[in-house]
Amino acid sequence: MRQLAHHEVPRSGHQYPIWLLLPDWVDPRNVGSAFRLADAAGLAGIVLAGSTPAPPNPKIAKTARSTVRSVSYREVPDAVAYVESERARGSYVLALELTDTSASLFTYPVPTGNILLIAGNESAGIPANLLALSHASVHLPMHGQNTSMNVSVALGAAVYVLLMKLQ
């Protein structure tokens, strides 16, 4: 067994119809991680909403490496207006948030078609007005003492569970 060099890694080129919505994120390093995730997972793109840091930003660039050039992204001032327009276009809005009605992403039946996955602010989570616009809320099971994890880590785990279900 040997580790593959960068140029030896097989790439499928497949793109999944999943957009990530990042409303009012604070840490540009988390944003950079989302870019890297979107590239690695073959996602349609990222929506940076409200006060979320956007490229060009040295901290985003350092974490994202070169993926800010390969991942489609858009900036929107109002996450609520954006979600309303995406719902009207037929996108399925999925909130990654532990709520009183959330389902485990492990057992949730993922819909086909365009998915808008919302991952909330690092400390406040997803605001109530965005949760109200979501078709459903899903969470990753938490087995330890803590009730949450870093937003970019949770987003990475959730995206790959979605991809597994879309296979």
Image: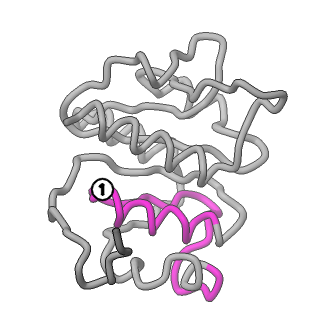
Residue at the farthest top position: 101
**At 51% across and 32% down in the image, what residue appears?**
95
In this picture, residue 9 sits left or right of residue 95: left
User: Element at badge 1?
Assistant: strand
Q: Which residue is drawn at 33% across and 56% down?
A: 41
Residue type of the residue flagged with mark 1: Leu
Counting the numbered discs, the total is 1
Quarter of the image that includes the N terminus: bottom left
Pointer 1 residue = 43
Q: Who's the residue at 66% across and 58% down the image?
A: 25
Rendered view: 105 above or below 37 = above
Instruction: State the residue lying farthest toward the right.
Output: 145
Q: Give the range drawn in magenta.
A: 30-59
Quarter of the figure with residue 40: bottom left
Location of residue 130 by image quarter: top right
Please tell me which residue lies in front, 30 or 130.
30
Tell me where residue 94 sits by quadrant. Answer: top left
Q: Position of residue 117 (x, y in %)?
A: 43, 41
Colour theme:
one colour
Q: In the image, residue 162 lies at what x, y percent?
A: 35, 36
Q: Magenta stretch containing residue 49, yes or no?
A: yes
Return the x and y of residue 18 as percentages of the image width and height: 30, 47
Image quadrant where one finds the C terminus = top left
Please tell me how crowded label 1 is: few (under 14), some (14-19), or many (20+) other residues with Cα within 10 Å.
Answer: many
| 26 up-or-down from 141: above or below | below
